[in-house]
Amino acid sequence: MVDRAHKPSAISPSAGGPKPSVHSERDRVIATLPTGDSVEVLTYGATVVSWKSNGKENLWLSSAAKLDGSKPVRGGIPVVFPCFGPPPKDHATGKLPQHGFARNSTWEYMGKSSSESGKLASGGDDAVTMDFGLSTQQLSDEARQAWSYKFDLIYSVTLGRDGLQTMLRVQNKGSESFEFQMLLHTYFKVDNVSKTQINGLGSTSYSDKVLNASEQTQTDPTIRINGEVDRVYKSIKQNTTSILQDGQPQLDVIRDNLEDTVVWNPWIEKAKSMADFEPNDGYKNMVCVEVGAVNGWQKLDPGDTFEGGQIVKSHL
Ligand SMILES: O=P(O)(O)OC[C@H]1O[C@H](O)[C@H](O)[C@@H](O)[C@@H]1O
């Protein structure tokens, strides 16, 4: 059971008018605003699998994604912790699978809080937050043996009229320090990736995992996708990465206390090689813009807490 005592108490929404609603099903929790905007979160991986605003789905989810807990979800927002990518063998995370254990562990739904105080609730609009917890005791024996530190994670998913906020709080509950990476592996849905532009990463240095080349610099302020892209942008100065479609702003991804962003599109061959990536040409309708702390390691001393995440705003 994750300790929620340090969380601020719920703030009542403004009086009058319809309120957001939250209902839980066997394997997921769904929040809906009076406007019809909604967000759906599986307890498996605390994976956000749908976020709709203005009647439109903002997240890409493979039609072959496994939602039954047998495999991390291909799409939505998988949570990556405590390592990104295949961990280095000589690191404390070295025995864990690619992207760690958070995305394939079952989290506890800790309840909702309504608020008008969040960053999404400007102008007195109601917002609703759902908290999910994962701690050492909930891990599989395999994961706990591979990484034996004591921790609490609280993942807070807030839906507001202005957008979606997802924040991960990491607490060291043990008596020794540990190192971790974290990332929110968001699959955004786009109409046509060939006409998608990504702005806000200009003049930033990155590692190109396709070319296996580190220390590259993004000279063009706009990234266009016309082939496989797998880049880790590091120590980014500006907080907002924007996704444009046909030259029109579609989404803003705002980093909160995180300095890195991965841009990924598997393109034709890699998409075909992933059994859970369907349809095969689904790469045309998605781009991953993944905020995180993945450049080196975050060190967390006993009792300390780290919090980072994103606010995503849709312009459509
Ligand atoms: O197949 P997965 O383990 O979900 O990883 C999917 C992708 O995640 C990130 O974007 C990495 O940068 C990619 O190298 C990786 O291929």
Image (tube, grey):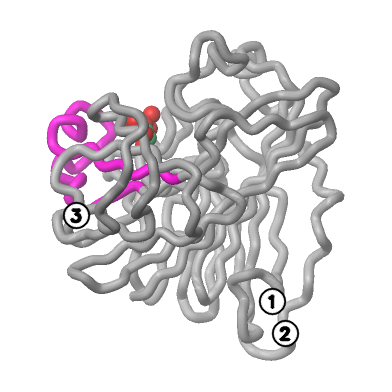
- Indicate the position of residue 184 as horizontal and vertical percent values: 49, 44
Q: Which residue sits at x=54%, y=49%?
A: 28
Which of the image's four quarters has the N terminus?
top right
Any atom of ligand 1 within 8 Å of the CB at mark 3? no
Q: Amino acid at mark 3?
A: Val
Q: Nearer the viewer, residue 215 or 87?
A: 215
Q: Amino acid at mark 1?
A: Glu
**Distance of label 1 from label 3 (alpha carbons):** 35 Å
Q: From the image, tell me which residue sits under label 2.
A: 14
Look at the numbered disc 3 and give the secondary structure of its residue: helix
User: Which segment did they paint magenta?
Assistant: 261-288
**Distance of label 1 from label 2 (alpha carbons):** 7 Å
Q: Nearer the viewer, residue 270 or 180?
A: 180
Q: Which residue sits at x=45%, y=41%?
A: 234
Q: Which residue sits at x=50%, y=44%?
A: 235
Q: From the image, tell me which residue sits under label 3.
A: 193
Corner quadrant of residue 277: top left
The relative height of residue 312 versus residue 122 in the rendered view (above or below) is: above
Q: Are marks 1 and 2 in contact (CB under 8 Å)?
A: yes
- Indicate the position of residue 212 as horizontal and vertical percent values: 28, 24
Tell me the mark number nearer the camera, choosing from 3 and 2.
Answer: 3
The relative height of residue 255 versus residue 109 in the rendered view (above or below) is: below
- Indicate the position of residue 299 as horizontal and vertical percent values: 69, 30
Mark sitting earlier along the chain (3/2): 2
Q: Nearer the viewer, residue 310 or 294?
A: 294
Tell me the mark number nearer the camera, choosing from 1 and 2.
Answer: 1
Corner quadrant of residue 220: bottom left
Q: Amino acid at mark 2?
A: Ser
The relative height of residue 288 versus residue 315 in the rendered view (above or below) is: above
Mark sitting earlier along the chain (1/2): 2
The relative height of residue 271 versus residue 118 in the rendered view (above or below) is: above
Q: From the image, tell me which residue sits under label 1.
A: 116
